[in-house]
Amino acid sequence: MNTTGFTAAGFERVREAFDQNFSDGLEHGASFAAWLGDELIVDLRGGYADRAGAQAWNELTLCPVYSATKPVAALIVARLVERGGLDYDAPVANYWPEFAANGKAAITVAEALSHQGGLPGFPDPIDPTLWLDPPALAAELATLPPMWGRGEGSGYHPLTWGYIAAELVRRVSTRSLGRILREDVCVPLDIDFWIGLPESEHGRVAELLKPKAAAEFPHHNAETRAAFLTPWAAAPRGSAEWRKAEIPSANGHGTAVAMARLYSAFAQKGRIGDARIFAPVTWDELTRERVSGEDRVLPGRVAFGAGVMRNLPLIYGPNPATLCHSGWGGSGAFGDPGNGLAGAYIMNRQGTHLLEDARRSRIIDALYACL
């Protein structure tokens, strides 16, 4: 074992759970971090950042966190809502008129951000390179008819969510979503997280080990096919072009410490340290349940706020009010407003589950057992 980092006194069981994942042969390289209020109580790293097992995972290793990026992007949208640039209850088309095409005129910003917009992917072929050109992809997305009616529940938008969010920001701001995150939040607070990773940082990115089995999709329907299963459902991940593009639904890169710190804004109702990211009333609007029930793409019952998942089912600790999100392959993060606890898990050995990952759950269960 080559675990480095620390746990605060009383949280030793978290390290035991982290190490057990390696002992059981479940990990290649991974990191877990947790903040309790403004105290970093866990910062663990282990294994290898490269496939060959020659480069130890260290405190500077970055990893793509896939869909766990979404709540981070939602923080930036919430800042614009608070400043009057956007309104959750206004139609998307108020800011992006082209979005009204084919029956989408009434879909609100909150509905789009809570996966109710009916656009989980492209049913018909597109050029996959469009995913690397967000404004062009958004223009194509605006022309689509929704795959279900307004008010008929959610269908998870694994990639398209980020292009909707980014285009809304682009329409009301002179800066991109990733640039706002960097300039207004991450640089001032010394948070090592990026949406749109400059080439100068690519050498720090962990090499991923793809899963040996196919992902487990619970539904065999048109919505799931459009979201995940067509040859054009995504651009190739991991290329330099993919890392540099701003894809707020899928290509956030960071350390576990950084991601957990950003999710502290959910645990502390809009605050990270001494910085007020937005007011508690905005936190209420961002995080309150917008839709719940059986999802057309994800397994089981889910509940969404305006860009963040609520802890249904209870896979991020025992508090149903915890705000959270899982990422492709097993990464995930959460913020528990009941006790000010935020945590994040990243790794480079990809799993196959869409929401829960046994490795992550073992660590989170140990963390809560220490409280």
Image: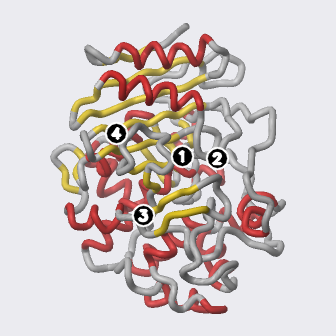
The alpha-carbon separation of the residues under discs 4 and 2 comes to: 21 Å
| Labels 1 & 2 near each other (Cβ < 8 A) | yes
| Label 3 vs label 4, nearer the camera | 3
Type of amino acid at the residue the image marks with label 3: Gly
Mark number for residue 305? 3
Q: Which residue is mark 2?
A: 354
Name the residue rendered at 77%, 64% in the picture: 128
The alpha-carbon separation of the residues under discs 1 and 4 comes to: 14 Å
Instruction: Provide the secondary structure element on which disc 2 rests.
Output: loop
Among the 4 quarters of the image, the one containing residue 350: top right
Q: Which residue is mark 1?
A: 326
The alpha-carbon separation of the residues under discs 3 and 2 comes to: 18 Å
Q: Which residue is mark 4?
A: 342
Front-most of 98 and 336? 336
**In the rendered structure, which disc, 1 or 4, sits on the residue that comes first in sequence?**
1
Q: Is residue 277 above or below residue 344?
A: below
The alpha-carbon separation of the residues under discs 3 and 4 comes to: 18 Å
Q: Residues within 10 Å of mark 1 (few under 14, many from 20)?
A: many
Q: Residues within 10 Å of mark 3 (few under 14, many from 20)?
A: many
Instruction: Provide the secondary structure element on which disc 3 rests.
Output: loop
